[in-house]
Image: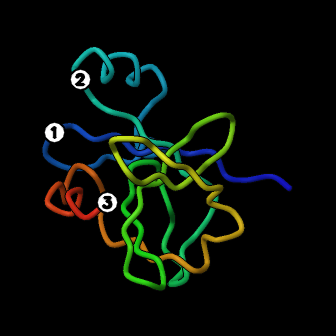
Amino acid sequence: MSREIKFRAWNGVDYVLTDEIEFQDIVSMQKKGFVFEQYTGLKDGNGKEIYEGDLLKDENGRIRIAVFAYGAFKVMWNNDNPTQLNLYPLNKHWEVIGNIHENPELMENVK
């Protein structure tokens, strides 16, 4: 099974999709402080693409963060003692409700 490899970049104000820029510009963007987040290759229950840094709500209303850790995309919660669960095959049971940059107020609900 293959997946589409793509990234989005946060510039402190909004996101830029990296498939819209030239590769050589990525190094320059990193030097300027852009934060890159990889597409997981998965979509939520509504068909929305899931990227690292996305905030996901489960069927019980709990909010989690999409991360890449230990060689796999996972959902993480409990910032004091991070707990992680593989994102796949649970992705269809989650809904992207925002991300860590544009919706920092939701981070307090990650438990």
- Pick the front one: 16 or 75: 75
The x and y percentages for residue 29 are 30, 24
Who's the residue at 55% across and 82% down the image? 45
Tag 2 near tag 1, CB within 8 Å = yes
> Left or right of 34: which side holds 74?
right
Q: Earlier in the sequence, mark 3 or mark 1?
A: 1
- Pick the front one: 51 or 111: 111
- Pick the front one: 71 or 109: 109
| SS of the residue under disc 1 | loop
Query: Would you name the residue on which mark 2 appears?
Result: 33
The x and y percentages for residue 104 are 17, 54
> Left or right of 13: which side holds 32?
right
* 63 versus 84 height, above or below: below
Query: Would you name the residue on which mark 3 appears?
Result: 110
Amino acid type of the residue that numbered disc 1 sits on in the rendered structure: Gly
Disc 2/disc 1 C-alpha distance (Å) = 8 Å
Query: Would you name the residue on which mark 1 appears?
Result: 12
Amino acid type of the residue that numbered disc 2 sits on in the rendered structure: Gly
Who's the residue at 15% across and 39% down the image? 12
Quarter assignment of residue 107: bottom left
* 9 versus 78 height, above or below: above
Q: Residue furthest front?
A: 81
| SS of the residue under disc 2 | loop
Amino acid type of the residue that numbered disc 3 sits on in the rendered structure: Val
